[in-house]
Image: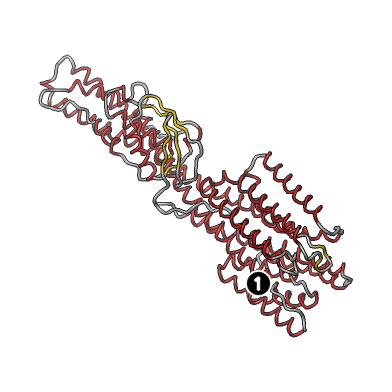
Amino acid sequence: MTDPRPSLRVSRAAERALRFAATRFFLNLRLASRVTVGMSAATTGRPWLAVAAFACVLYDVLYYLALRRGLRIPLPVRLALDAADVSVWSMLYGAPLDAPSLVAAPLAFETALLRGATGLLAPLVVCVAASTVLLATGGQLSPAPLLWPGFGAVGGLLFSRYLEARLRQRLRTAEAERQAARSQAELAGRHSVAVGADTVVDLLTRTWPLLAVPGKPAASPLSAWRQRLSEETADHAEYLAVALLRWEQRHNLASPDLSRDVEFRPTGGCSSLLLTPHQVSVLEELLVRLAPTGTVTVTVPRPRPLGLRQDLHLGDRAVSLPADERPHTPPFDPGPAMIGLGALGSLGHAYPDMDGVPLPPALGLTASGLAVAWWAHRRVMARGTSAHGVVLAAALGFGAVDALVSTAFMQTLESGGLTRLPYLHFLLFAGPLAVMYLRDLSAARRWGTLAATGAILAACTALLPVPLHLADVTALSWPLAFTAGTSSLRDLLDEENSGFDEELARARAAAVSEGYRGGRADVLLLVREAAEEARRRLTQDRTALDPVFLPEIERRLTEVDHRLATLQQVTPGRPA
């Protein structure tokens, strides 16, 4: 049974990660909103409003520090503060309401992150409050107070699912690794007693024929061990190399004919490739049908995550182990979800207050982005983290198409006194995705990602129908806010992984020690029972045995007893 402590550790890790994500995105997005409102107000001749916006930065920082230090502000109070914030700034700032509305997105994100679907109430409350104030003051209604907090809530739900599934998959893989490591250690424990130069097993096996008398079986009781090996089946996960070694031992022990013996030589990632019990069973059936002999090199061209199909080369024969028939948690990766959210966000290009892109091109971008997200999902399912490079490349490819099309078809050139930069939208999903993936990629791919990003920005800036102004640089605050938050989140996840891995390593070490001791004890018990049977046979059949052999039999059995006593006194350490 799996130790429950890692599950508790995961729960604590998840809660810390969720709260960290919530507070960090809280500060980043609110600061981006204030800077955008302040610069827009300054460029449209409303300096007093710009001063008020930048003064709110101090309020946001103090608010963030209070949350970071553990101050528990009731959710209804925080929701009322955000609803009032969005309502007042919607009234003072006027259309477009996108930047003021984004102030409430972090709370919606946090609520959905920690409380699930309850977070969907936050956008509704903010929208009702802002719309009521706008109606009372004669302002222009807008979907922004519902749209942007709604995006925050959806993002919180998706990220919560990602983190939970990620940790659940880690637990499943860790349990499989623990089982496989124990099995491998058990083999090492058996070998420490039974394999080597003139072991106690060899000595007793050579002694048994000297006890043969007419009318009694001459077979050694140690044949029971061989029978047990031949009947042993895997009911747990197994490393491929260990599964091959177990089958090799059973096969070679089953017959004295040396011409049918086999020796597997696993290469590459075979030692660390995990197979499920179902796949181990399929592998054994395949080996029985193929009946390999001699030296067989085993390779795995492309290892896949636990439970998925594995393709092997046994010498010059290609075989496949099907995916596990049991339901399992697939590897959940943020890449496809981020690309999908970016594809949905491409519809925002058609919003008149944003870029005014005609609806057909915007719908085409969304459809193509969703297709890329589905392709990325299938690739991650098949290849796990090894797919990060191609998924990031696909995200940048879609981002380039989105940036070029939205810039070429934009009809809204200015909003709130600032030039519209529709091509920055691709950084909202490609930037965070690059941060999550880059540490897993080679240096060449990292530089390639930076070069591709720079090329997209340069090409689209050249396509803009109007020149840029210094104040337009504030548009970069949005992708920077998302990317900086994701970077900090990756740091936290790596830190949590380190602590989580330490606990799993302790559980694995305990399983290895248990398996090694169990393997030794298994063989020692069999040898002790065989030695006792040899003693009884010697006592009962002494008169029927050749007198010439008696002294040698006595000497060998005494030597067996001495070696058993020595082996049982030694405290075995863990195998290397």
Can residue 20 be spotted in the picture? no
Q: Residue furthest bottom?
A: 136
Q: Residue furthest top?
A: 548
Q: Residue furthest front?
A: 360
Label 1, secondary structure: give it: loop
Q: Position of residue 384 (x, y in %)?
A: 54, 47
Q: Position of residue 40 (x, y in %)?
A: 83, 67
Q: Quadrant of residue 368?
A: bottom right
Q: Which residue is mark 1?
A: 73
Disc 1 crowd, CA 10 A, few/some/many (<14, 14-19, 20+) = few
Q: Position of residue 467 (x, y in %)?
A: 86, 58
Q: Residue at x 30, y 27 (%)?
A: 201
Q: Quadrant of residue 527?
A: top left
Q: Is residue 210 above or below residue 59?
A: above
Q: Amino acid at mark 1?
A: Ile
Does residue 496 appear left or right of residue 220 in this picture?
A: right
Does residue 377 appear left or right of residue 71 in this picture?
A: left
